[in-house]
Image (spheres, helix red, strand yellow):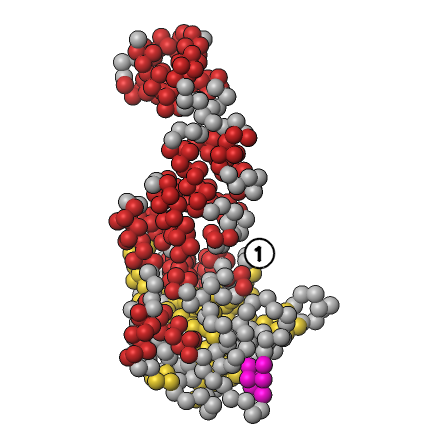
Amino acid sequence: MQWDIVIGLEIHVQLATRTKIFSGSSTAYGAEPNTQANAVDLAMPGTLPVPNENAFRYAVMFGLATNAEIGRRSMFERKNYFYPDLPKGYQTTQLAQPIVGPGHMDIDLPSGDTKRVRIHHAHLEEDAGKSLHEDFHGMSGIDLNRAGTPLIEVVTEPDMNSAEEAVAFAKKLHSLVTSLGICDGDMSQGSMRFDVNISLKPKGSDELGTRTETKNLNSFRFMEQAIHHEVERQLDILEDGGRIVQETRLYNGDRDESRSMRTKEEANDYRYFPCPDLLPVEIDDSFIEEARNSLPELPDERKARLMEEYDLNSADASTISSDSNMANFFEEASRRCGEPKLVANWLNGEIASRMNQENIRNIALAFIGPDVIASLITRIKDSTISSAGAKKVFDALWTGENDSVDAIIEDKGLKQVSDTGALETMVDEVLASMPEQVEQYQNEDNPKKRKKMLGGFMGPLMKASKGQGNPKLFNEILVRKLGE
């Protein structure tokens, strides 16, 4: 039997407010455990929560950026469950009246098409603390610093049908919230966490299958692996005549294995009821317009502008526009050297490769700035160095050996030989040492074959020049002399 894959996402986006959603405690990352949780965060008797206005502003900005309905009246409920890192015994969240209603985002597919993924809603809530299981001599510790940190939980419709589509949506969402400035996007610190709902149904059927939820995935790679793993697990069960159990699962990316965490709760299991300490929040037109006016250039708008202003192709523009820091880097380097296509090639090539190798997620933290890459491209453009020489210069720049392009070229003797007299002498010597190849070239009438045969002379020429001969000039001299 053939099966359709159906995927929906629940994405927790940690908002970049300076204080928590209901208290004045700091949200700064990296403090000593349990030093940033006050009596309000712990719901001590006699304390009352006070909503953080910025959390609402950020949620409205997200709603506007995803073409969503804004909840003019939203309210908080208490969601009751008992985990060691949930100090109150309940989570303050939104259910019946969320701040953001239905919206959508369009994602680019490998085929070049776009697909619309509907957003069911996004609601405000507080984060829980964190359980620590290492270095406690067989015991677990609890860090409540994160308790009360504001989140929006983005819930999609089950509109995705492959791991690739789900990851494309997650990356697009990451690009959006970081461009908005409402989230730092650092998944290693838990700033974005993905829950993936997956089910299978007979191909073409309108009836959805039983779904499972794989929780707390904190990287695009683990998310993709977890989806592939769960699809295979469900396929094996269904093909053997078994039944899928609705449950919550955990995935271990290092081992590529998953396990059941608990059977899936329904809403009534959480015993939701309106929070008695928080009044409903009314959002007026002026608040929404203020948020709208604060929206920066969004990734789709940025992509269209980069394609128009810099004549980039869609693929390069998509990659660069997805990250505001990368877009700023690109525009600054392009302004300095006047070669936007070369800047895009280096950004999507050598720089992206090195960042991936060293797990650098923000180009602002990379070891090379836009002024330096512009200087490097200028030296390629004016034929001071060859492409091969440029990579050697880049290696030295990246490792911090030197931060001056010209100094590296000088120190390593990478300056390209463009003296036509010296190059002609080398060409004469190489041609004299290859009489058979010269005769074959001159007797060949097919222009394409002759062009290909030129490559056979370039290797010896570059060797003779110790890799510093100007390839373009070499080629021009070769064609002229071989035609004489």
How would you classify the magenta stretch by its main secondary structure?
loop
Q: Quadrant of the C terminus?
A: top left
Q: Write the residue at 32% across / 64% down.
A: 105
Reading the image, the residue beneath label 1 is: 254
The region drawn magenta spans 38-44
Residue 169: x and y in percent read 38, 60
- Specify whether residue 335 is painted magenta: no
Q: Is residue 61 above or below residue 438?
A: below
Q: Write the residue at 43% across / 46% down.
A: 370
Query: Camera-side residue: 64 or 50?
Result: 50
The amino acid beneath tag 1 is Asp
Left or right: where 462 falls relative to 101: right
Residue 420: x and y in percent read 39, 17
* Visible residue check, residue 135: yes
Residue 403: x and y in percent read 52, 41
* Visible residue check, residue 264: no
- Specify whether residue 42 is painted magenta: yes
Q: Quadrant of residue 375?
A: top left
Looking at the rendered structure, the secondary structure element under dot 1 is loop
